[in-house]
Image (cartoon, rainbow, N blue to C red):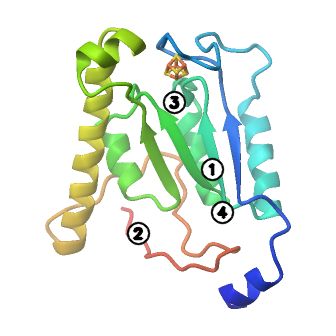
């Protein structure tokens, strides 16, 4: 079915859901709306999160907007992102950058259906760190630089596919999808090795 025909009938599920995956956080920002920092003992397990994603896939929800807390401090966070993408559910997530390593940044740059937001509260360390805590500006900037390098690497791959090897596929990650069932949008095949 063409995309235009699909939308003529309307949607029977939300386009996007917001999901506060954890209340745990490595920072203590002055303005935190989630009173974050401590993990809720009732937090969903990995299996329960996967079941939620399965349900979102069955409903054909386009994507989830994941926040917290700081979602990346969950040990299973990257697994859940990979699980969602592999099950037709796109992911946007907000992070203070604490787990955005160069390897992860390269992986994100080569992954479809994932958007990243890095949180800052000022254009200088003096302003930002008064709100978000000592060292939080440098941490966020490092994460942004890692992402920029990851995307540069992706561009190099497109321009010089023989010279630039792709980021290694993390263990357990599935091959990214090529077509979203709801939008029917084709995406380029990724040559993971
Ligand atoms: S990084 Fe986000 S979740 Fe953590 S304390 Fe700051 S505002 Fe709250």
Q: For the residues marked 2 and 1, what is the alpha-carbon distance in whole angstroms?
A: 17 Å
Whether residue 85 sits left or right of residue 156 in the image: it is right
Q: Nearer the viewer, mark 2 or mark 4?
A: 4
Q: For the residues marked 3 and 2, what is the alpha-carbon distance in whole angstroms?
A: 24 Å
Quadrant where the C terminus lies?
bottom left
Residue 88, disc: 4
Residue at x-position 61% and y-position 27%: 68
Residue at x-position 58% and y-position 51%: 91
Q: Residues within 10 Å of mark 4 (few under 14, many from 20)?
A: many
Mark 2, residue position: 190
Mark 3, residue position: 72
Counting residues from the start of the chain, the first of labels 3 and 2 encountered is 3
Q: Is residue 63 visible?
A: yes
Q: For the residues marked 2 and 4, what is the alpha-carbon distance in whole angstroms?
A: 16 Å
Residue 118, relative to residue 168: is it above or below?
above
Q: Residues within 10 Å of mark 1 (few under 14, many from 20)?
A: many
Counting residues from the start of the chain, the first of labels 2 and 1 encountered is 1
Q: What element carries label 4?
A: loop
Asked if ligand 1 lies within 8 A of label 2, the reply is: no
Asked if ligand 1 lies within 8 A of label 3, the reply is: no
Q: In which quarter of the image is residue 189?
A: bottom left
Q: Is residue 161 visible?
A: no
């Amino acid at each position: 079915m063409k995309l235009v025909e699909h939308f003529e009938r309307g949607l029977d599920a939300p386009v996007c859901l917001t999901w506060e995956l954890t209340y745990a956080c490595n920072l203590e920002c002055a303005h935190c709306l989630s009173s974050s920092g401590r993990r809720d003992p009732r937090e969903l397990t990995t299996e329960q999160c996967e079941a939620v994603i399965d349900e979102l896939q069955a409903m054909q929800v386009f994507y989830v907007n994941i926040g917290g807390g700081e979602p990346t401090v969950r040990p299973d966070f990257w697994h859940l992102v990979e699980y969602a993408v592999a099950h037709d559910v796109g992911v946007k997530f907000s992070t203070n950058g604490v787990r955005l390593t160069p390897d992860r940044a390269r992986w994100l740059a080569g992954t479809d259906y994932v958007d990243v937001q890095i949180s800052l509260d000022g254009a200088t360390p003096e302003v930002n760190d008064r709100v978000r805590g000592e060292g939080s500006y440098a941490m966020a900037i490092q994460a942004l630089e890692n992402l920029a390098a990851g995307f540069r690497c992706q561009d190099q791959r497109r321009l010089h596919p023989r010279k630039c090897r792709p980021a290694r596929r993390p263990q357990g990650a599935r091959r990214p999808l090529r077509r979203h069932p709801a939008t029917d949008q084709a995406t380029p095949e990724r040559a993971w090795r």
